[in-house]
Image (cartoon, rainbow, N blue to C red):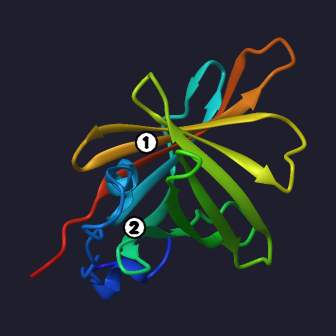
């Protein structure tokens, strides 16, 4: 598979063994199932009251890990100007005691974050940073549009409680060859 429009050569490897959820795992494990697979990303920013038409390409690849008890996903962020690519890996595990997802994000620049997430009444998975404590409250949620398209929306929570959009990542599944 040609990698010309991807942010990294990872999809060119055609890695399509994504594992499977453990049959003993809680049913909630499927809340992040949409991340499993190879995804081409269109990264947009919020500008002048709407999402930009142009986008920066990126890549997000997920699989079942830790014997099917977790979703492990790799992020290959867009190259933006002279800034180096944002690369990292998440390990997402559903904690039955808290009823929430416990996550660790490890970036190649050495930064690490502890995050949590939960499925809310609006039907979307909402995520937030636990440590290090963010400088400003943020909102992050995922929208699943279809089996092959999902989005992640990021932004700031302003002092008055309103939300200000910042980033949108639209993910499109890249089918495996063979």
Query: Residue, x 9% and y 82% (percent of image)?
Result: 178
Nearer the viewer's eye, disc 2 or disc 1? 1
Q: Is residue 107 left or right of residue 72?
A: right
Q: Residue furthest top?
A: 160
- The span from disc 2 to disc 1 (Cα, nearest Å) is 19 Å
User: Residue 99, how many percent across, how many down?
Assistant: 52, 45
Quadrant location, the N terminus: bottom left
In this view, the residue farthest toward the left is 178
Q: Nearer the viewer, residue 134 or 5?
A: 134
SS for dot 2: loop
Instruction: Please name whichever residue, 71 or 108, is drawn nearer the observer in this view of the structure.
Output: 71
Q: Secondary structure at mark 1?
A: strand
Residue lying at 45% horizontally and 23% vertically, measured from the top left: 121
* Front-most of residues 82 and 138: 138
Reading the image, the residue beneath label 2 is: 5
Q: Quick check: 93 left or right of 135?
A: left
Q: Position of residue 34 (x, y in %)?
A: 33, 53
Q: What is the number of the mark on residue 151?
A: 1
Which residue sits at x=44%, y=80%? Answer: 66
Asked if residue 4 shows in the view, the reply is no
x%, y% of residue 80? 67, 60
Residue 21 visible in image: yes
Q: How many residues crowd mark 1 within 10 Å: few (<14), some (14–19), many (20+)?
A: some
The x, y position of residue 69, in whole percent, is: 40, 70
Sooner in the amino-acid sequence: mark 2 or mark 1: 2
The reply to whether the C-beta atoms of the residues labelled 2 and 1 are less than 8 Å apart is: no
Q: Horizontally, is 117 left or right of 158 in the view?
A: left
Against 152, is 12 above or below?
below
Question: In the displayed image of the protein, which residue is found farthest to the bottom?
Answer: 13
Q: Which mark is residue 21?
A: none
């Amino acid at each position: 598979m040609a990698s010309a429009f991807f942010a990294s050569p990872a999809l060119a490897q055609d890695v399509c063994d994504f594992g499977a959820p453990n049959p003993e795992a809680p049913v909630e494990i499927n809340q992040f199932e949409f991340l499993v697979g190879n995804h081409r990303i269109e990264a947009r920013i919020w500008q002048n009251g709407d999402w930009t038409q142009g986008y920066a390409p990126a890549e997000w690849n997920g699989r079942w890990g830790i014997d099917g008890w977790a979703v492990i996903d790799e992020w290959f962020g867009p190259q933006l100007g002279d800034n180096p690519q944002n690369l990292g890996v998440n390990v997402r595990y559903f904690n039955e005691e808290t009823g929430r997802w416990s996550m660790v994000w490890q970036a190649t620049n050495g930064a690490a974050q502890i995050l949590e997430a939960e499925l809310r009444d609006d039907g979307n998975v909402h995520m937030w940073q636990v440590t290090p404590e963010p400088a400003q409250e943020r909102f992050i949620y995922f929208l699943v549009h279809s089996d092959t398209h999902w989005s992640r929306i990021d932004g700031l929570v302003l002092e008055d409680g309103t939300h200000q959009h910042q980033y949108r990542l639209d993910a499109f599944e890249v089918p495996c060859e063979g």
